[in-house]
Image (tube, helix red, strand yellow):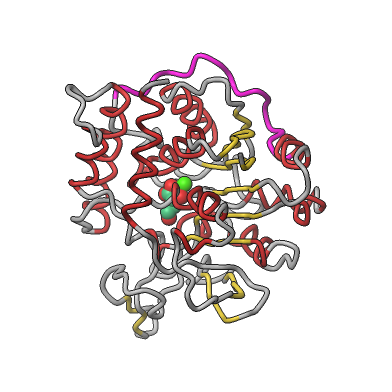
Amino acid sequence: RIPIWLDCDPGHDDAFAILLAAYHESLELLGVSTVYGNAPLSKTTSNALSVLKAVGKESTFVYPGSWRPFSRHTKHAPDIHGESGLDGTDLLPQPDRKPLRYCNAIKDMRDALMSRPPHTAWLVATGSLTNIALMFAVFPEVASHLKGLSIMGGAIGDGFTDVYMGPEYTDSVGRKHTRIGNTSPFAEFNICCDPDAARSIFTNPDLTPKTTLITLDLTHQVCATAEVRDMLLFSTVKQEPPTKLRRMFYELLMFFAKTYEAVFGLKDGPPLHDPLAVAVVLASMHGSLHSLFDDAKHERWNIDVVTEGEQAGRTRASPASEGVFIPRSVELKKFWDMIEDCMAKADHA
Ligand code: BDR
Ligand code: CA
């Protein structure tokens, strides 16, 4: 099994990332760290504990990390995830344990990743990059030790895929811009929370060749439509009535769908961003990511993160042979089957 560490800010889609990381038979989940983001750190930490309890993986350790970025105000997303970060269901259990430690996530993350042989373990980040940037700054040896780094964050736009993010944006001096972000017209939430942290990751030459970036250009192709939601509620073998776990995830998806429609006018269902970053690790098992993600053009990209001004948090991509991989498309059926498979396993746990 591939050892992975998940750094997250649950978060409706992070909850699915936890499910996939905890239940896929090819993964060994070493630990979960939390970061401020969708909600304040105390809430994202409690949510991680609750989700692990709900899916029957209470023995997985949870380590709280940063409660704010280095040098900016903290952003949260109550309009999308509710005040708790995981609004929309009464079926989420209260955590009955505490995180393993307070405020030492980066040391524990480092120790867990370094405890595995070189070039075997993956780090997956589905929140702002503050924790992982700190870890690589304090413990630089982890970068060359890792097998891979998978990040959900950023938005490329400029025809990278044909995803539509909303009407053109006119800036303060009347220039028109194609909308590419979800937090500003230019920027995606995880990167926008801490652009300095993101820049430190994307300029680290020990990391970029082994990094895969899951951007909005891809995640907006992976919407939890009514059909997908029903499939996950009833399972492919049509159990009646649906289990409590399936109802909980269904209610979370319904809340997420409602906020995405209210905020972005998206009627097809919410993009399930974060579990795609876990799926990257699974796809890598087959020697390349091609089984799940398309890379026919063998493209690699340098990512320049805008850190100041109106476009702060923007991720600009330019071709670079040692750069990051950014999938442009995914095999949707394979992806949803993976989620369903893990849901079925958690149901029987
Ligand atoms: C990202 O932002 C968060 O709100 C989601 O959990 C996801 O990680 C999408 O932009
Ligand atoms: Ca997230």
User: How many numbered marks, from 0 up?
Assistant: 0
User: Which residue ends up furthest to the top in the rendered image?
Assistant: 96
Residue sitting nearer the eye, 291 or 121: 291
What is the quadrant of the C terminus in the image?
A: top left
Q: Residue at left 38%, top 70%?
A: 180
List x then y, in percent, for residue 13.
40, 44
List x then y, in percent, for residue 99.
60, 23
Q: Quadrant of residue 305?
A: bottom right
Q: Is residue 131 magenta?
A: no
Task: From this view, report whether residue 231 is shown above or below residue 208.
Answer: above
Find the magenta span and give its range: 90-106
Q: Residue at left 27%, top 48%?
A: 224
What is the quadrant of the N terminus in the image?
A: top right
Q: Is residue 92 magenta?
A: yes
Q: Residue at left 58%, top 75%?
A: 301
Q: Quadrant of residue 197?
A: bottom right
* Side of 153 where 141 appears, left or right: right
Task: Tell me the chief SS of the magenta region.
Answer: loop
* Side of 224 where 188 appears, left or right: right
Task: From this view, report whether residue 305 is shown above or below residue 29.
Answer: below
* Side of 243 where 32 appears, left or right: right
Residue sitting nearer the eye, 145 or 43: 145
List x then y, in percent, for residue 189.
46, 56
Residue sitting nearer the eye, 169 or 162: 162
List x then y, in percent, for residue 235.
25, 33
